[in-house]
Image (cartoon, grey):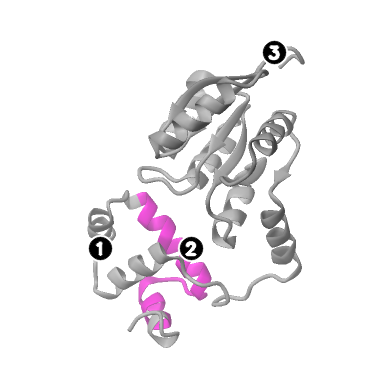
Amino acid sequence: MTTDAPISLLIVDDHPVVRDGLRGMFESAPGFTVLGEAPDGTAAVERAAALDPDVILMDLRMPGGSGVDAIRELTRRGARAKVLVLTTYDTDSDTLPAIEAGATGYLLKDAPRDELFTAVRAAAEGRTVLSPAVASRLVLAVRTPRRPGDEPLSAREREVLALVARGTSNREIARELFISEATVKTHLTHLYTKLGVNDRAAAVAAGYDRGILG
């Protein structure tokens, strides 16, 4: 990318209104060009391969393919694009996996317009960009590693655990929650880690023991 060339973007978000807003914001500002959009992580990987953007603005929680899975796959493929996470969530269970998967930066959607532009320019240059709230969480997480059971389950992880406790299969959980089986497996992996267990039975036992399951 030469200094005079505009920074090319791929916008990934499951909400069309958000995609439209971001597209309008960047297309009205000098120095940026929006190459395309994607509604989920799976489509993002395909679009990134086809369009080769400089920076991907990536939401995290999307039906049909999560942002973290997409970042991991882009990293595995050696994609040139830098990924800047743009999300409403700043919890540890979202932040740390995204950074570990290979995201260059992590901003919240309430970031001011100028901060977002600066972050995209920095990401294009390969510099790490973190919103202050996320940066402080990361520092805290590094200084005080969590013990299994310290981190609360997300609302979706609680839903998955409750269905597991009823003997529901991954396929049935996916159908009931309108998510893919791969996403169900991801939720299970996360809740196993948080509960400090290795299988479904132990997860259910830990859920009852800790009052997560009534």
In this figure, which residue is indicated by the disc labeled 2?
Answer: 190
User: Was residue 201 drawn as part of the magenta stretch in this picture?
Assistant: yes
* Mark 3 neighbour class, 10 Å CA radius: few under 14, some 14 to 19, many 20 or more: few
Label 3 – label 2 distance at C-alpha: 41 Å
Horizontal and vertical percent position of residue 72: 54, 43
Q: Which quadrant of the structure image shows residue 95?
A: bottom right
Name the front one of labels 3 and 2.
3
| Amino acid type, residue under disc 1 in the picture | Ser
Which residue is drawn at the image coordinates 39% and 57% (left, top)? 185
Q: Is tag 3's residue or tag 2's residue first in the polypeptide sequence?
A: 3
In this figure, which residue is indicated by the disc labeled 1?
Answer: 169
Residue 5, labelled with which disc? 3
Q: Main secondary structure of the magenta part?
A: helix
- Magenta range: 182-206
Horizontal and vertical percent position of residue 51: 51, 19
Which residue is drawn at the image coordinates 41% and 66% (left, top)? 155
Q: Secondary structure at mark 2?
A: helix
Residue 52, labelled with which disc? none
Horizontal and vertical percent position of residue 80: 63, 27
Which residue is drawn at the image coordinates 69% and 34% (left, top)? 114
Which residue is drawn at the image coordinates 46% and 71% (left, top)? 198
Left or right side of 211 for 181: left
